[in-house]
Amino acid sequence: METNPVTETLRAIYSLHNRFNEIHQALTKAPRILALHRQRVDAQRQTLENASALVLEQKKLAATKQGQLDDGEAKIKKRESQLMECKSNDEYKALQQDIKASKMAMSVLSDEILEVLDKIETLEANEAKEKETLEKFQVEFEKFKADMEEKRPALEQRRAEILEKLKEEEKKLPSEFRDLYNRMARNTFARDGQYDVLSPLNNGICGQCNTAQVKNTISQVYVGEFCACQSCGRILFAPEGRDF
Ligand SMILES: [Zn+2]
């Protein structure tokens, strides 16, 4: 038995729909993926800024403490020079005690500075790591963007060509069939941004929702009559190699 022309047309339309959907999805998905890349770069830039702020904060702390140390040491030197000018033993001892206490304080301050310097080293390593990550994300963003811009014109052209072919095929459908088909096609495209109106009937089962069809439906499909799946409502057609 020869394949009827409606079935031939539906097979062609189904194949064009699949190709259209694939290209259309790639085209509509790309800007969303690009936006995610951009978000990731922005978030990482913020992370790096935070890491740099921590380094700066500790560097300021180290500078303050270093200033205190320099002042303290200068004062100790000054007091040491005053020792010789002491007029009494008590005065001398008191000044000596004072110098000793100051030296202790300076020693503690020195240790604190070393701790801060250690901390700065760790924070700077972290900052460098975050910077590297940012650069990596930026490269990936630029690469995706360039790739997208390079591919877009060809994809858009192919999509337009498929739409042209689709129109040609759709014209071949009997007018009543075509009206029903057109309405469904418009609806699914408006709803999902893709054409999803046809389903191959595989061994009496809808290829999209796997619902077994009644005998009457199956025989109608094979003669190319308009027939929708009882469950999902897609238009059923006989796929290649199933002409009886
Ligand atoms: Zn179905």
Image: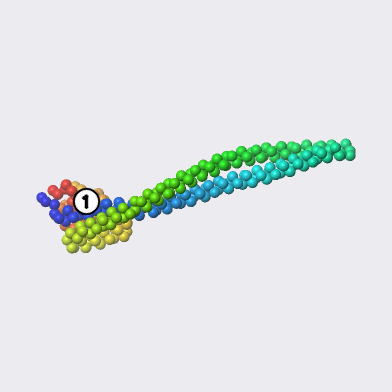
Q: Name the image quarter holding residue 231.
A: bottom left
Q: Is residue 169 left or right of residue 159?
A: left
Task: Tell me if the residue at label 1 has its CB under 8 Å from ligand 1.
Answer: no
Classify 209 as above or below 121: below
**Any part of residue 95 in sight:** no
* Residue plotted at (46% across, 44% down): 136
Where residue 176 appears, as percent x and y from the top left, is 18, 63
Q: Residues within 10 Å of mark 1 (few under 14, many from 20)?
A: many
* Residue plotted at (89% across, 39% down): 87
Q: State the residue position of label 1.
A: 200
* Residue plotted at (48% across, 46% down): 134
Q: Is residue 43 left or right of residue 6?
A: right
Q: Is residue 76 left or right of residue 170?
A: right
In the structure shown, which secondary structural element does the residue marked by tag 1 occupy? strand
* Residue plotted at (77% across, 42% down): 75
Where residue 163 appears, as percent x and y from the top left, is 26, 57
| Residue furthest right as drawn | 88
Q: Name the image quarter holding residue 190.
A: bottom left
> Residue type at mark 1?
Pro
Classify 47 as above or below 95: below
Count of all numbered marks drawn on residues in the image: 1
Where residue 138 appears, as percent x and y from the top left, is 46, 48
